Amino acid sequence: MKRSLSFKQWSLVLALFAAFSFLIFFWYDRTHQDAKFCAFAEAFFLDEVQANPIHLHYTIDNPSAYGIDESALTLPVYRAGEAVNDVYALSLAKKSLSGINPDALNEKNRQLYDLLDSYLAAAAGVSSYPYFSEPLSPSSGVVSELPILFSEYRIDDKSDIENYLSILTQIPAYFDGLLIYEKEKAQAGLFMSDKTADRVIAQCTALLDRNSLTDGSHFLIVTFKERLQRLVEKGLLTAEEASSYEAEHSRMLVSIVAPAYDRLAQELNQLKGNGKPLCGLAGQENGREYYRALLCLRTGSYRDISDIKQLLAKDLRFNYESLLAILSVNPSLKDMINKTPSLLPEMTPEEMLSDLQSEIGEEYPLIPENVGSAPIRSTIKYVDKSLEAYSAPAFYMMPPIDNICDNLICLNAKDTQDDLALYTTLAHEGYPGHLYQTVYSKRYQEQQNILPLGNVLYYGGFVEGWAMYVELASYDRALDLAKESHPEAAIYYQACRLERQFRLGLYSLLDIAIHYDNASLEDVQALCYCLGIRDSANVAVLYQYIAEEPCNYLKYYLGYLEILELKRQAAVLWSDPGQMTAAYDNMDFLYRFHSFLLQNGPADFRTLARRLAAE
């Protein structure tokens, strides 16, 4: 006989069905939201990397694996009025992102969601002021950047040669677009000062020097020939093909690229007089508001400017007073610092980098070894003499995200002549600085199957703050190498480190004073005079650099101070009461803290503080 279910049994069945349905819906919602976010993140990543074929070439080694036809990409040529469209484009991206429920994402995707959400908001804040950006900045603009990028453009086969030569043909149109933007800046009353324009014009003439282009001694011709020769040696190119490409390359530089630089210089000369005299952003309408937004985007710090001032001022006072105390007891140190004696054992740059690398695994975690991981290699080279005046003291060329094995550090001989400066610079650029942090992050992301989205979000405060943090720590390592033969190195290196921190802290405060408080050159000279810096010519050069490069020093030094603040937070969270001070010297604590930074960065510091609190 067929029996029906009782009311209690039916209630149980319905409850189980409801629970099962909820679980199915919950599972579907989570997997659906993850899939939706992954699709959005992939599209965002691909849009960003394809926006500029030069940047793509430096970011991805094998574009076809991402479905990208590198040969089809062209330089982004600015069109009239496009600057105001950036905010709209960012708002559309933000709207699309808001259609995804972050609470339904897995932990890795939720963290990426939060990062992107904050980044888009910060970028939109900057884009709200479309004509404050300066793509032709003398220190970091395209005029000086392009020749460096061209000289290091990776050439592995014929297609790379063809893509590179194609980019050269696009330079005139690219520069024409920049000139349209500069004219719009002039109409908005935000064109560069005549002093800045003169510097850019001088670069146009010096970097594409006709004499060296004609006689074949120009660094672009020389480096291109060297790269082709390597292909010939590998059997990927015949000597005849190499010769033909060299001739075509030289012709393009003389007949296409150099004339584009000449025209840019001529047009800038015509635009002179449309800008204000050299001053900070505070001297422009809405300049303070733009500076606040730029500071947040460039440094990743969400502190109020008043709080940043206090943080920098406290650090400056400590370093200044500590340095004065050392100099008062050791008056001969001042001359010693000026003479920069060699106290380290005699080492090549490669040997210095190897020594710094040997420290990895103690207070810094080893780089993850993934399946099939190739060894990490590094090359050190000096920039061409003709570039020394326009190059940073050193820079690390980031490898493609899909081939991080070969890493390049470029040194400027003009700025790395003494052994301590060279050693600490290699710590900054190499181990445990940019090279190590970059490779560790990429390997970790690969190991954890984290989407590559973060590779197109630039967190200058974290990246440069980390490099500054380890650079300053490298003074202790340098002392270990020097003290046996030179006992005086202890006090000398301590003074050098304090002097370095004092200057960077001062320059960071001056950045705020110039761009937010509207400090004039005379104001800056008066402040520097009170602090014992009385070379008015050097102070004028400093003022011009800071006025032209807002937030640059803050990216380095505020980033460093933010990392120290995270370190204090970690000490409170991870140490027993009363043991905070001891934690800073504890190798296990340092290893854990450095692992946290490397595995959670690059990111803004608000996000890092939240993740640290959740550890």
Image: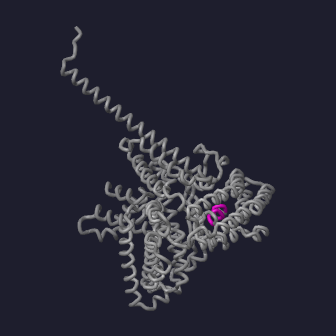
Tell me the chief SS of the magenta region.
helix
Q: Is residue 172 left or right of residue 422?
A: right
- Residue drawn 25% across and 24% down? 14
In this picture, which residue range is highlighted in magenta?
144-150
**Residue 525 image point, x, y percent:** 48, 82
Q: Is residue 26 left or right of residue 223?
A: left
Residue 5 in the magenta stretch? The answer is no
Residue 483 visible, this orientation: no
- Residue drawn 63% across and 59% down? 178
Q: Is residue 480 left or right of residue 347?
A: left
- Number of dots carrying numbers: 0
Relative height, residue 59 to residue 14 (above, below): below
In depth, the one of 132 and 271 nearer the eye is 271
**Residue 440 image point, x, y percent:** 48, 58
In depth, the one of 246 and 488 nearer the eye is 246
| Quadrant in the picture for the N terminus | top left
Question: Residue 300 falls in which quadrant of the image?
Answer: bottom left
Relative height, residue 31 to residue 263 (above, below): above
Display coloring: one colour
Residue 577 visible, this orientation: yes
Q: Is residue 377 left or right of residue 164?
A: left
Relative height, residue 395 to residue 164 (above, below): below
- Residue drawn 70% across and 60% down? 227
* Residue reaching furthest to the top: 1
**Residue 567 image point, x, y percent:** 35, 65
| Quadrant in the picture for the C terminus | bottom left
Relative height, residue 587 to residue 23 (above, below): below
**Residue 199 image point, x, y percent:** 63, 72
